[in-house]
Structures are given as C-alpha cells and as structure tokens.
Image (cartoon, rainbow, N blue to C red):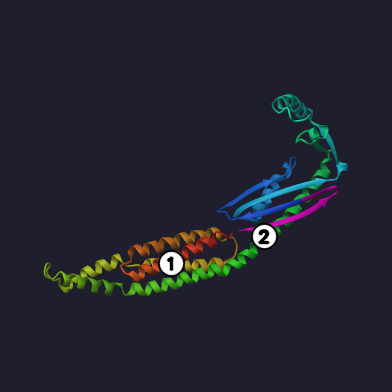
C-alpha cells in the first residue's frame, strides 16, 4: 500500500502541484492539506480517492500559485497595530535591540497578505474542474505505483502459503503416528509402575489410549489449515482489494497453529507448530502491505 505520486498542472494564470502519498493502514484514512479558499473541491477530492482505494493512510497535498496579475497586496492593519503595541515592551526588556525597520515589519507573517481578485463563477468552476482532473492523474499514478508493489509481493505471499501447506503436510504425517506413540508411552509408564500399580488389561489400555488420542487429535485443525491455504491462493488469483481478507486469514491460521501446539503430545509436532507460527507471522507482515 505504499507509494508516492506528484503531478503538476496549469489553467489560465494558475499553476498547481498535487502530491499523493500512501502508507500502510488497516482501513482507509484520508488526510488533506489544501490552501484556504479551496473548500469547494474538498468533498469531490475525497470521493475521488475513496472511489479508487480501499485501504491505506493517504496524504494528499495541494499547492497553488498564480501570476501577480491576479493578486494584490493588502496591509493587515490589525496585525500591524498589535506588533507596534508590543515593540516598547520588547525594547524595555532588550535595550540592546535596535528600532524595527520597515522591511522587517512588513516581512512578519500576517502583516502583508496576498489577495486574489474575484473570479466569476464560471471561471472558478472551470478552474476547480481542472484541479480535480489533475488529481485523478495523480491517483492513477499512485495506483500504478501500488500495483507494482503488489506484483512484487504476490510471489512472496504465495511462497508463505506454500510453506504453510508444506508444514501442514509434515504435521499430518507426525499426527498419524500419535496413537501408537501414546500407546507405547502408556505401556512403558505402566511397566515402570508395575510394582506399585496392577498391570492394565489390554482392554483398559486400549480405552486409555483412545481417550488420550482423542484429546490429541489435530485432524480438524489440519483440515482447516488446508482450507485456509486454498482460500488464500484463491484470493491471490482473484485479484482486487484482498488485504483485509488475507489479514483475517492470518488470524485463522494463527488460531489453528495455537490449537495444534496445545494439543501436541509429540516434540516433533510441537516444533512444526512453532515453525507454522513463525511463517504465519511473516505472512501477516507482508499482508499489511496489501490493499
């Protein structure tokens, strides 16, 4: 979701620059910075961004300049009077400071203001339309930038999904041996306690193994992992705005990996579960970059 675009335009005596920057975000957050007097294009500009992007923190800035023929200077007497009123206080506290100069006073912010001569309604509408058309060019450039980033990320995300499927297969192979491993551990345990505890009958031993194996059964978790991998690959193949859906899948992946680790009665299965969690974390980091 990261990207940057800058476009410039002109209309009559006006020239302008749009800058659009995008960084990662869970939803769509728009921040605009425009000069005073451009409130009329604020809403359509926001609608244009929202129509094109579904996710990310977007910063949109507009700067406008125009020829001096359209402008005139105005002295802000109120600001000047306030400054002149405090000069004696400043000189009393700092006597080494010389008297203020005319050019120094005029250079202070707010003393001189630039006023635009009024445009008629038709000219202003044409100017606003040109500004919005230029913004669309900037948004198109930003979309291309983000799409290029997405194209670079797609094989990375697909690789993480493939690794999750590989670990799921390894977990399934280990899980298939768990009932026998539980049986062997239980037999060994009763053998060690043979002097203190009566030997279990084969029937009772089978019952105990069945109970422990049921508690350690991770087939449902493995099936759901397989389904989530398939869903992730389908999202990548389908294109469009899939970032939020992939983000949700990461939560589901992590839930199954946690349950697998908690049910594990085998060191190797636990190791696979921890590897799964590591890959899922890597996947989540990349998904944050996807719209």
| Mark linked to residue 276 | 1
Q: For the N terminus, which image quadrant? A: bottom right
First in sequence: mark 2 or mark 1?
2
Check disc 1 and report its element: helix, strand or loop: helix
Compared with 80, 152 (above or below) is: below
Nearest the camera: 34 or 139? Answer: 34
- Give the magenta part as a residue range: 1-16
Nearest the camera: 260 or 87? Answer: 87
Q: Which residue is mark 2?
A: 143
For the residues labelled 2 and 1, the Cα–Cα distance comes to 33 Å
Compared with 23, 237 (above or below) is: below
Within the image, what quadrant is residue 199 found in?
A: bottom left
Q: Which of pointers 2 and 1 indicates the residue nearer the eye?
A: 1
User: Crowding at label 1, few (<14), some or many (≥20) Cα neighbours within 10 Å?
Assistant: many
Check disc 2 and report its element: helix, strand or loop: helix
Q: Residue at x 84, y 36 (%)?
A: 73
Residue 2 magenta-highlighted: yes
Determine whether, in the image, residue 259 is placed left or right of residue 7.
left
């Amino acid at each position: 979701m990261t990207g940057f675009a800058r476009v410039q335009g002109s209309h009559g005596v006006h020239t302008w620059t749009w800058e659009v920057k995008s960084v990662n975000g869970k939803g769509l957050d728009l921040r605009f910075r425009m000069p005073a007097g451009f409130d009329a294009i604020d809403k359509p500009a926001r609608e244009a961004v929202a129509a094109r992007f579904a996710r990310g923190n977007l910063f949109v800035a507009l700067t406008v300049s125009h020829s001096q023929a359209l402008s005139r200077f105005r002295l802000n007497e109120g600001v000047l009077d306030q400054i002149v009123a405090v000069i004696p206080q400043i000189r009393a506290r700092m006597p080494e400071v010389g008297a203020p100069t005319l050019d120094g006073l005029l250079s202070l912010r707010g003393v001189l203001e630039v006023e635009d001569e009024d445009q008629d309604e038709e000219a202003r509408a044409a100017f606003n339309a040109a500004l919005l058309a230029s913004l669309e060019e900037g948004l198109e450039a930003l979309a291309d930038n983000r799409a290029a980033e997405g194209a670079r990320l797609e094989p990375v995300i697909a690789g993480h999904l493939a690794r999750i499927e590989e670990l799921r297969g390894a977990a399934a192979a280990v899980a298939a041996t768990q009932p026998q491993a539980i049986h062997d551990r239980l037999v060994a345990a009763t053998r060690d306690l043979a002097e203190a505890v009566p030997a279990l009958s084969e029937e009772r031993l089978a019952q105990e193994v069945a109970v422990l194996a049921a508690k350690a059964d991770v087939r449902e978790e493995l099936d759901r992992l397989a389904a989530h991998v398939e869903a992730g690959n389908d999202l990548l193949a389908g294109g469009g705005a899939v970032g939020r859906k992939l983000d949700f899948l990461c939560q589901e992946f992590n839930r199954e990996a946690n349950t697998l680790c908690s049910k594990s009665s085998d060191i190797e299965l636990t190791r696979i579960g921890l590897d799964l969690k590591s890959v899922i974390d890597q996947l989540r980091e990349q998904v944050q970059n996807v719209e």
